[in-house]
Amino acid sequence: MPIVLHKSPAPLTALPFDLEAAMQGISEWAACESPTWDACAVDRMLDLASRDLAIAGGRIERLPGRMGLGGCVRARFGNAEGTPGILVLAHLDTVHPLGARDRLPIRVEGGKLFGPGVCDMKGGTWLAVEALRVIHAAGLRTALPVTVLLTPDEEIGTPSTRDIIEAEARRHRIILVPEPGTPGDTPFGNLASGRYPVSRFTIRTTGRPSHAGAHLSAGRSAIREMCHQVLRIEDLSSERLCYR
């Protein structure tokens, strides 16, 4: 997470970073399962993140959930209130149901940490919070104020938090999302400036009934036409997704 610092006695690269502590911290977040539709589980994850943000020096605000979903956490760093700064935007809900860690255990293999929600996106979010903690512990401050906004419903298209995200984004100069990029995302390496969006379509097809034995050819299958339309919608995308 690139953060511009005021002049300090030591360069940013000299700040301490403990890999073992990172593995432990991310593992604790992954162990706190938070499927989107379980508001209580998501709020437990936000409780854990709030504690770490407070340790990092943030001023914590909890926003209640709606639509039966979890709430949000907003943490502010720095004293330049009202100055457009940096927004670190992340979600802590996952697609994994409760109990997924029994089937997909949290583990380290080949120097890599595996577990439900580690990649999307508890690992990157924990690292962003840890970067703020290390900066705070070193007695440094960022040139711009930093806000961290953690949301509960990204995996279903942010229906309950879109207005909060948009309002917060308008108040900031830079928005960083600590979700990992993939090789070749942009000319800047793994830094992605845009991602494949969510689209929803409502399709209605009307058929014509006929007797399956005597007059099958006289009918028109609504289900078959629906399948054709689904394929046409998929072809509208410039990215062909493959699910396995």
Image: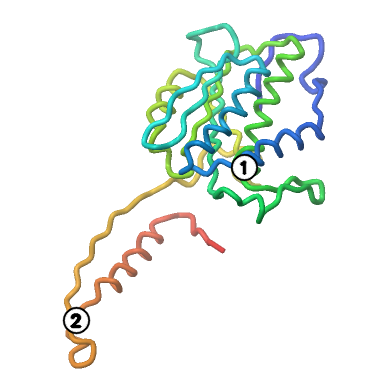
Give the residue pinned by disc 2: 219
Q: Residues within 10 Å of mark 1 (few under 14, many from 20)?
A: some
Colouring used for the render: rainbow
Q: Nearer the viewer, residue 226 or 153?
A: 153
In the rendered structure, which disc, 1 or 2, sits on the residue that comes first in sequence? Answer: 1
Three-letter amino acid code at the position of disc 1: Gly
Q: Secondary structure at mark 2?
A: loop
Query: Which percent across, then down, holds residue 124?
Result: 65, 35
Compared to residue 197, the image places residue 147 above or below, namely above
Q: Is 157 on the left-hand or right-hand side of 118?
A: left
Residue 181: numbered disc:
1
Q: CA distance from mark 1 to mark 2?
A: 49 Å
Q: Quadrant of the N terminus?
A: top right
Residue at x 23%, y 92% (from the top left corner):
213
Query: Which percent across, then down, holds residue 20?
Result: 82, 35
Q: Which residue of the protein is positioned furthest toward the bottom in this rendering?
A: 214
Residue at x 55%, y 17% (from the top left corner):
60
Compared to residue 243, the image places residue 163 above or below, namely above
Q: In the picture, residue 59 is in which quadrant?
A: top right
Query: Which percent across, then down, holds residue 2?
Result: 66, 25
Query: Is disc 1 in contact with disc 2, using a CB cutoff of under 8 Å?
Result: no
